[in-house]
Amino acid sequence: MPKHYEGSCHCGAVQFRLEADIKVGVVCDCSICIRKSAIMALIDNDSFSLVTGQDALSVYQFNSFQAIHYFCSHCGIYTHHKRRSGEGLAVNTGCLTSFDKTQLAEIAHFSGASLSVVK
């Protein structure tokens, strides 16, 4: 059963909501994910709604330029990204209010580094 979550960046300029049943977190080993060290929740596109902060969001793309990473241009916090496959989003669980990542049933590891076009 999906739960309702509120989320935001650190300064609150970007705020969002989502409805999802988050049982699995994902950790990726690509060059950006290693540096941001986020545990992500994979959700459907229609589960996510941006409440405020469209004008505060900045975009970062790299390597194959397929994934679109969003972060707050004020505080720099990565909030979410559109996945490279175009199917769904990944949300930074650290941005979710009242979410305890220790309650995740599993943390899956994704080998984003293997998808790199730069060797």
Image (cartoon, rainbow, N blue to C red):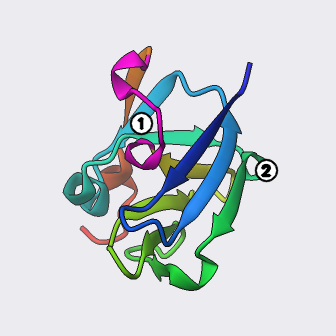
Q: Residues within 10 Å of mark 2 (few under 14, many from 20)?
A: few
Camera-side residue: 89 or 30? 89
In this rendering, the count of numbered labels is 2
Percent coordinates x, y for residue 89 in the rendering: 61, 52
Q: Which mark is residue 26?
A: 1
The quadrant of the rendering that contains the N terminus is top right
- Three-letter code for the amino acid on which mark 1 is drawn: Val
The quadrant of the rendering that contains the C terminus is bottom left
The residue tagged with tag 2: helix, strand or loop?
Answer: helix
Q: Is residue 93 above or below residue 7?
A: above
Task: List the single residue furthest toward the right.
Answer: 46
Percent coordinates x, y for residue 15 in the rendering: 57, 62
Which residue shows up at 48% across the image and 43% down it?
Answer: 96
Left or right of residue 38: residue 51: right
The residue to which callout 2 is attached is: 46
- Does the magenta segment cover residue 2? no
- Does the magenta segment cover residue 100? yes
Stretch in magenta: 93-104
> Earlier along the polypeptide chain: callout 1 or callout 2?
1
Looking at the image, is mark 1 or mark 2 nearer the viewer?
2
